[in-house]
Amino acid sequence: NAGVTQTPKFQVLKTGQSMTLQCAQDMNHNSMYWYRQDPGMGLRLIYYSASEGTTDKGEVPNGYNVSRLNKREFSLRLESAAPSQTSVYFCASSELAEITDTQYFGPGTRLTVL
Amino acid sequence: AQSVTQLDSHVSVSEGTPVLLRCNYSSSYSPSLFWYVQHPNKGLQLLLKYTSAATLVKGINGFEAEFKKSETSFHLTKPSAHMSDAAEYFCVVSRVNNRLAFGKGNQVVVIP
């Protein structure tokens, strides 16, 4: 059981470039999430998917798009990267979208936009 | 709106001494509360959670937290720090829209 996996682990982009962050979970969870973590701040929700086929905006969705490819996979796309998107990105999953459910986190992707 | 306050962004403790990380929250209803730990270059891992059952919650690795509604607090404690406890700790509160609000974190350093 790998849990939640994310690729790549590190990425450096130039302003204006695009990229997709990949996330997969093998726990048969229904709900998946994308967060960003900036220094001195807690995690902030970018997008989430309560179940396969649905996606919703979180607190900070501007500049991002997501795709829930199937039950296992949830990708995050930056269409035109900006320096303000330099951050650590975490994917998480939970069995249901209930707020009491434990979220399981991946190891993160460290993204630098120059 | 629900928010979380974690004081003391950096906490140093000597190995073998107690750990206390303070968390206060504001909420218009009785929320669920969580503590997550993040070791260097790792994802977050759940330590413990409160979901309206017993107010004293025991978690992994000897940690526990007590929900005090009158004080709107959910402080995390451990009787004796271990070197492996060096990490960042996040207090998290549920929101009415089924989302989570994360505190800014406590960076814990354990001194041998």
Image (cartoon, coloured by chain):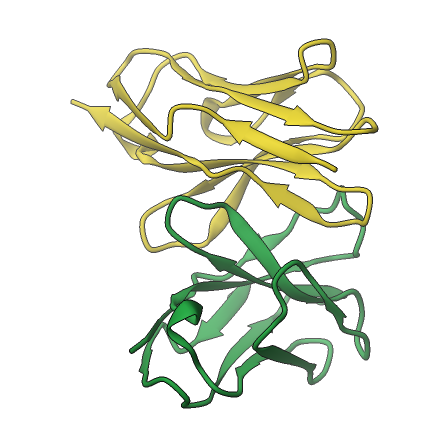
Chain colours: A green, B yellow
Place of residue B61 in the rendered image (x, y in percent of width and height, measured from the top left): 45, 29
Answer yes or no: is residue A75 visible.
no
Number of numbered markers: 0
**Viewer-side residue, A14 vs B86:** A14
| Side (left or right) of A91 relative to B83 | right
Q: Residue at x 28, y 14 (%)?
A: B16
Place of residue B66 in the rendered image (x, y in percent of width and height, measured from the top left): 62, 15
Q: Residue at x 33, y 55 (%)?
A: B41
Q: Residue at x 41, y 90 (%)?
A: A17
Above/below status of B23 relative to B86: above
Name the image quarter holding residue A15: bottom left
Answer yes or no: is residue A88 visible.
yes
Q: Which part of the image, by quadrant, shows the N terminus of chain B?
A: top right
Of all residues, the one furthest to the bottom in this rendering is: A17
Place of residue B18 in the rendered image (x, y in percent of width and height, measured from the top left): 36, 12
Q: Which part of the image, by quadrant, shows the C terminus of chain B?
A: top left
Name the image quarter holding residue B75: top right
Q: Residue at x 73, y 9 (%)?
A: B70
**Viewer-side residue, A47 vs A101:** A47
Of all residues, the one furthest to the left in this rendering is: B112
Name the image quarter holding residue A109: bottom left
Place of residue A108 in the rendered image (x, y in percent of width and height, measured from the top left): 43, 63
Above/below status of A18 relative to B74: below
